[in-house]
Image: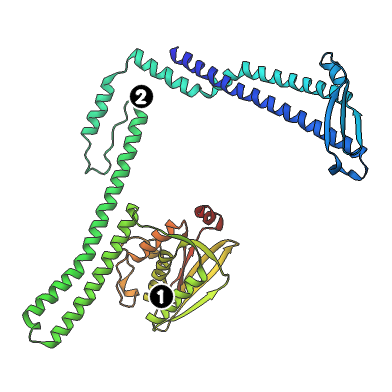
């Protein structure tokens, strides 16, 4: 009951606070209406009396009264005097009395509305505060009736006995009073287990990928130590292999660091309004320079702009181009295309006429460390992180990928970026 009384007291105070504000608004509104009515009447009167609307010739305006009785009589004898070289006097008594009647009627209706809200406003505010009142009552009930502390001790013991290594370990739900809390804890535990499994898998995959180049480098170093000091052929072969594996390991570490920064929120994005035409032109020209074995073509169906990070978006397109080149035979064609899915929805496509993507691989190509059948590539081995990085970049731009591929015909991977309303919102 004390909680209910406190809520009622708060509702009453809030009600009076709002009602006095409403009363002040009524007074200001009525004063403004009176002022507007008087100014309009004066303007209409002067327009009728003055020739050619020569308002600039008026040097004085005044209201005068001829009676000293009550307010009604005073308003009835009201006169309006105005003029310059020529003075005019107009009876304003009828207008003054009409304004008084209209203001009294209006103020009376407003006063009735105000009194009604003063009476009913407290109950209305209490209705909004009802949830707080219910919380107070439940809290008071728990305090007065007492709550079984053994329930909390049971929950505490259950949490202490949880085994973090068991994937499906959860708290038992056996008490209705604690069911909501137990469910929330179980959901948290499940998310922690999922995160732990992803972390373990990521570390295992990264270790496996790093183990191969390290083993190759160690093998060639041992071979150099045994025969390379005297055999120039072994020396050249070893140096070349070590350089290749070191470069591969460097790229892998850079990709791992990129994904780690992205997942921890430390990968900064510098968004700006950029021309997708210029971006694709640059990527196409760079691809022609570094890969003379393929024919690159640029098709701009609709010049488009996007709100994006230039460096990251260009990296995503380059990854698609590198992937297309890897699975396209020499002298094959790779096309960069920019088109509009709708008026403000840009789409970047990278299309090749290579071996295509089989259905089994299509659903996994954005998974980390996933690589398709090596026999289907041109003998080039990647880290399996490129498309995962590209997906992270496009996800951060709130875009998505679409894939269309046919075996031995080719593949087309499209980047669909968000529409302009999202870009404008981000820019603000």
**In terms of image quadrants, where is residue 216?**
bottom left
- Residue occupied by mark 1: 355
Left or right, 129 with respect to 50, comes to left
Residue depicted at 10% across the width and 78% down the height:
223
Q: Report crowding for label 1: few under 14, some 14 to 19, many 20 or more residues within 10 A (C-alpha).
A: many
Image location (x, y in percent) of residue 310: 44, 65
Of residues 222 and 158, the one nearer the viewer is 222
426 to 88, vertically: above or below: below
Expressed as whole percent of the image width and height from the top left, the position of residue 171 reads 28, 34
Mark 2 and mark 1 lie on one chain; the one further toward the N terminus is 2
Residue drawn at the location 34% of the way across and 27% of the way down: 178
Check the image and report above or below for 288 versus 398.
below
x, y (%) of residue 78? 86, 23
Res. 365 in view: no
Circle 2 SS class:
loop
Q: Which quadrant of the figure contains the N terminus?
A: top left
Residue visible at 64% across and 20% down in the picture: 117
Closer to the camera, 40 or 148? 40
Label 1 SS: loop
Up the image or down, 278 lies above or below 100; here it is below
Residue in the foreground of this view, choosing between 154 and 130: 130
Q: Nearer the viewer, mark 2 or mark 1?
A: 2
| Residue 177 numbered mark, or none | 2
């Amino acid at each position: 009951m004390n909680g209910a009384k406190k809520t009622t007291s708060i509702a009453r105070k809030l009600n009076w606070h709002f009602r006095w504000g409403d009363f002040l608004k009524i007074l200001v509104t009525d004063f403004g209406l009176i002022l507007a009515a008087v100014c309009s009447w004066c303007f209409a009167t002067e327009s009728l009396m003055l020739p050619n609307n020569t308002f600039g010739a008026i040097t004085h305006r005044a209201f005068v009264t001829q009676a000293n009785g009550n307010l009604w009589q005073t308003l009835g004898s009201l006169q309006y005097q105005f003029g310059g070289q020529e003075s005019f006097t107009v009876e304003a008594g009828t207008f003054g009395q009409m304004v008084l009647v209209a203001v009294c009627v209006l103020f009376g209706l407003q006063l009735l509305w105000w009194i009604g809200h003063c009476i009913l406003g407290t109950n209305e505010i209490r209705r909004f505060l009802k949830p707080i009142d219910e919380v107070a009552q439940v809290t008071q009930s728990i305090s007065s009736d007492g709550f079984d502390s053994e329930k909390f001790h049971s929950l505490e013991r259950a949490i202490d006995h949880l085994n973090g290594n068991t994937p499906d370990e959860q708290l038992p739900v056996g008490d209705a009073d604690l069911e909501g809390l137990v469910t929330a804890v179980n959901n948290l535990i499940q998310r922690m287990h999922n995160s732990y499994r992803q972390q373990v898998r990521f570390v295992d995959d990264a270790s496996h990928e790093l183990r191969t180049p390290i083993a190759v480098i160690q093998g060639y170093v041992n071979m150099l130590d045994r025969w390379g000091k005297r055999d120039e052929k072994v020396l050249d072969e070893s140096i070349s292999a070590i350089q290749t594996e070191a470069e591969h390991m460097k790229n892998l570490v850079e990709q791992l660091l990129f994904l780690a920064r992205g997942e921890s929120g430390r990968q900064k994005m510098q968004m700006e309004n950029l021309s997708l035409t210029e971006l694709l032109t640059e990527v196409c020209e760079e691809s022609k320079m570094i890969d003379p074995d393929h024919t690159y073509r640029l098709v701009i169906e609709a010049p488009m702009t996007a709100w994006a990070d230039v460096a990251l978006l260009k990296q995503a397109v380059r990854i698609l181009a590198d992937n297309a080149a890897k699975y396209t035979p020499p002298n094959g064609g790779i096309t960069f295309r920019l088109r509009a899915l709708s008026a403000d929805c840009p789409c970047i496509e990278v299309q090749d006429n290579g071996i295509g993507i089989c259905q089994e691989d299509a659903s996994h190509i954005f998974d980390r460390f996933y690589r398709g059948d090596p026999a289907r590539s041109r003998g080039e081995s990647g880290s399996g992180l490129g498309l995962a990085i590209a997906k992270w970049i496009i996800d951060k731009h709130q875009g998505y990928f679409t894939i269309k591929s046919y075996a031995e015909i080719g593949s087309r991977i499209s980047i669909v970026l968000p529409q302009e309303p999202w870009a404008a919102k981000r820019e603000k």
